[in-house]
Amino acid sequence: MGDINRDDDTVEIAFPPRFSFGERVIARSAIRNDGTYTGKDIGEVLVSKGDVGYVTSINTFLQQFYIYAVDFVETGHRVGMRAKELCTLDHLPDDVLERLGERAAALRTIGTGSDEGTAR
């Protein structure tokens, strides 16, 4: 969340949240501790690009942004993230799934604990 800019003209909360409770999401970039995560050093990586987690709550920040609490089960970290830092794995648009072709089937099992259909 270190890149939050108060001068950003976007008012996300004027629209519904992009993600919902329990939705499976993937991190689009690495997230480092900005000092708000207790027990970890500032700058320490909390979430790596490609980590899969589940949205556990949705809050707001600065009456402007949605902050999604995402539980990354494999690492045990629950981290607050912006929508631009996440991508859904549960509700991809049909045109994206179509472009992925057979690889789209592997997305159904990522982060579910099932190794069926995972590509290696």
Image (tube, grey):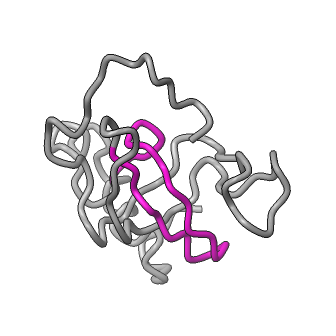
Camera-side residue of 31 and 8:
8
Residue at the bottom extreme? 114
Camera-side residue of 116 and 30:
30
Relative height, residue 118 to residue 98 (above, below): below
* Apparent side of residue 22 relative to residue 84 in the rendered image (left or right): left
Residue at figure coordinates x 68%, y 61% from the top left = 37
Camera-side residue of 13 and 94:
13
Give the mark count: 0
The x, y position of residue 80, in whole percent, is 50, 56
**Residue 74 magenta-highlighted:** yes
The x, y position of residue 89, in whole percent, is 34, 57
**Quadrant position of the N terminus in the picture:** top right
The x, y position of residue 13, in whole percent, is 22, 40
Residue at figure coordinates x 32%, y 17% from the top left = 9
Camera-side residue of 9 and 106:
9
| Highlighted magenta segment, given as a residue range | 66-88
Dividing the picture into quadrants, the one containing residue 98 is: top left
**Residue 60 magenta-highlighted:** no
**Quadrant position of the C terminus in the picture:** bottom right
The x, y position of residue 115, in whole percent, is 50, 79
* Apparent side of residue 38 relative to residue 60 in the rendered image (left or right): right
Dividing the picture into quadrants, the one containing residue 11 is: top left
* Apparent side of residue 62 relative to residue 22 in the rendered image (left or right): right
Residue at the right extreme? 41
Majority SS type along the magenta span:
strand
Relative height, residue 60 to residue 62 (above, below): below
Residue at figure coordinates x 24%, y 47% from the top left = 18
Residue at figure coordinates x 33%, y 67% from the top left = 108
Relative height, residue 58 to residue 21 (above, below): above
